[in-house]
Image (cartoon, helix red, strand yellow):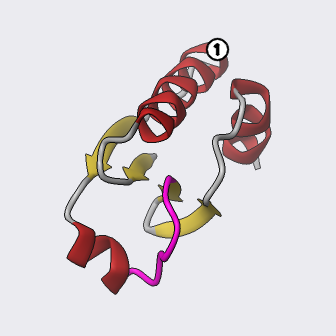
Amino acid sequence: MKIEILGTGCPKCEELAKNAEAAIEQLGLDAVVSKVTDIVEIANRGVMMTPALSVDGEIKLVGKVATPEELKTLFAS
């Protein structure tokens, strides 16, 4: 599973990344979390609000910091 955090590195982006890593660890998933900080690339993906979260290339969250519990539900589906 490839998880990307899209954002410029703001505190909310960092919090979403931390929550994603916690959810992955709690679920025992084999996943890689990376960050996309280039605003042009973020916009090219159709994201106009950050932070955003992509799972295997599909945008799943925009403009929200999801909790680890919310992310566990998202990752398990």
Query: Does the magenta run of residues contain 23?
Result: no
Callout 1: few (<14), some (14-19), or many (20+) C-alpha neighbours within 10 Å? few
Viewer-closest of 39 and 74: 39
Report the residue at 72% width, 30% height from top.
67
Q: Is 13 left or right of 34, judged from the image as shown?
A: right
Image quadrant assignment for residue 65 = top right
Report the residue at 47% width, 75% height from top.
47
Q: Position of residue 8 (x, y in %)?
A: 30, 52
Name which residue type carries label 1: Gln
In the image, residue 18 sits, relative to residue 32, either above or below, namely: above
Q: Main secondary structure of the magenta part?
A: loop
In the image, residue 39 sits, relative to residue 52, either above or below, namely: below
Query: Does the magenta run of residues contain 47?
Result: yes
Residue denoted by label 1: 26
Viewer-closest of 73 and 37: 37
Q: Position of residue 69 (x, y in %)?
A: 78, 27
Q: In the structure shown, which secondary structural element does the residue marked by tag 1 occupy?
A: helix
Report the residue at 41% width, 48% height from top.
5
Q: Position of residue 24 (x, y in %)?
A: 55, 25
Q: Position of residue 6 (x, y in %)?
A: 39, 56
The magenta segment is 45-51
In the image, residue 36 sits, relative to residue 67, either above or below, namely: below
Report the residue at 69% width, 39% height from top.
66
